[in-house]
Image: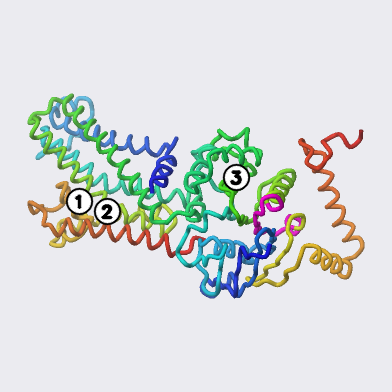
Amino acid sequence: MRDVVVTEFWKLRRSGVTWTTAGVIVVAVLGAALLTWIVRDPARAASLGLLGAKANLAGLEATWPAFGSYLTAIAGGGGMLLLAFVVTYLVGREYVDDDTSKNMLGLPVPRWRFLAAKLLVAAVWWAVLVILLLITGLMAAWTLGLPGMNTGTVLSTVGAVLAAAGASFLLVPVCAWITVASRSYLAALGFALGMLLLGNLIGHTGWATWFPWSIVPMLTLMSGSVPTPLPWTSFLVLGLTFAAGTAGAVHRLNTADNP
Amino acid sequence: MGEVAIRLVDAFKHYGPVRAVDGLSLTVERGEIYGFLGRNGAGKTTTIRMLLGLIRPTGGLVEVLGHDVTSGTRSWLRQVGFLVESASAYANLTVRENLAIQQRLTGSPSPSIDAVVGQLGLGPYADRRAGRLSLGNKQRLSLARALLHRPELLVLDEPANGLDPAGIVEVRELLTSLCREHGVTVFMSSHILGEVAHLADRIGIIHEGRLIEEAPRAELARRARSYLAESFSAQQREEALLTADLERYFLARTDPVGIHGTKAGERRA
């Protein structure tokens, strides 16, 4: 297993995709910081042309707790999309860009190990992005001098970001499954985008705590009214989603034709 | 010889109404070079993918090195090197890095990367990214990947794809040497008779998923000559011979290392 994990990391050498995802995270955090700055100083933002005449900033706050909730939303909602992209890329490149799936699947290695290694690489990749998100977010908040920032609130935000990031990771094996089944990027990315929209929609219904793609937005306060804390069954649903996605992808790798 | 490397017994692969492989039976003995000849769409690649466990036969028996390919075990693949259809590699990695992945996952000895890079003339490109290689060098990389772990059996699908005539001769000589000196079994497909005619001990012809003819090379050549004599005019036979002569002449004139015993430009002297 160690050899498979090592080679999966090797495959990322000189890959521009890793830097692209890092750029997306940094831009998202800086966007949240810009919004917070506009809320804090709307007159100056208006004088710089950053605020339209009809902009409604009611209900928005320029505080650390508010900014922390943006960071949590980026880790959760953004994670659902960005992480889906990462996993789809790791699996899909074997079928699309490099056409190496036949080389990989013809090796004397149990095929489940490739999926496990790719998910592990995705987890490490995601962990690095989340750390980057937290560092950039803390630096931006410190630069803006946001009120309400103390050890307790920072740790609380870090905990919420990690919980959202972890929860969104549990959804990605389904994208791996779709990528293996479709041997393409598009189906899995379309699925991830569709689920993000559907999850927000179902988040406003009574089924929200049972639908995996609603649970993460609820956890990050992006959607619906959150029962505090979320029922244990919601975490069970996330765990089962992870298990089903992984099992589906492994089954597909083992039994489907690879023409 | 004598032991069986590949055995297909009444093997089928159907895709709905399409019979890609339709009751194929053949045996390849260890140490043999078997040429698997067929037109595009005849079922060559499907057969090769079945041999490697990449697709599952609809029916029949497919055994490689004594292992049923549908059994689920994969350790036997350690003794198999392969090249399927098109050359492929991780474009962002160098030739050496691509081979290092193969080496790590097949447990081949560490000096073998340099050895195989040299064997296939990839030395000047060893540190070049695979995405920037020419088609011919990509094919050489794929062949290097297949040879790296010193397999007992080589399964090669159209190995000459993208290679220039000199490259074809180099690969042909490499495969012959692996077979004669190291006892490696070679199962290679092609849609060009000339490509396998120089190399194979036995040749099987597949058409519409079925083996329609199988014979030792000399016997197949005799049948071909006899058929040509009966079915083609003297002028058509002359044209065929002219093509073969021109190819030999081209190889001799462009062969920088004297593979054919005559370096470029030496003939006149």
From this view, report whether residue B59 is shown above or below residue A99: below
Label 1, residues with CA under 10 Å away: few <14, some 14-19, many ≥20: many
Mark 3 is on which residue type?
Ala
Q: In which quarter of the image is residue A14?
A: top left
Q: Of the numbered discs in the image, which one, if any, rests on residue A162?
A: none
**What percent of the width, then of the height, locates residue A100?**
50, 50
Q: How far apart are marks 1 and 3 (CA)?
A: 47 Å
Mark in the foreground, 2 or 1: 2
Name the residue carrying label 3: B144
**SS for dot 3:** helix
**What percent of the width, then of the height, locates residue A61?**
10, 35
Please check the rendered image and state whether residue B195 is part of the magenta-colored stretch, yes or no.
yes
Q: Do labels 2 and 3 share a chain?
A: no
Name the residue carrying label 1: A216
Mark 1 is on which residue type?
Val
Q: Which of marks 2 and 1 is nearer the N terminus?
A: 2
Relative to B158, is B66 on the left or the right?
Answer: left
Cβ atoms under marks 2 and 1 closer than 8 Å:
yes
Mark 2 is on which residue type?
Leu
From this view, report whether residue B214 is shown above or below residue B138: below
Label 3, residues with CA under 10 Å away: few <14, some 14-19, many ≥20: many
The span picked out in magenta is B179-196
**SS for dot 1:** helix
Name the residue carrying label 2: A171
Label 2, residues with CA under 10 Å away: few <14, some 14-19, many ≥20: many
Q: Distance between the residues labelled 2 and 1?
A: 9 Å
| Residue lying farthest to the front in this orientation | B2
Q: In which quarter of the image is residue B238?
A: bottom right
Q: How far apart are marks 2 and 3 (CA)?
A: 39 Å
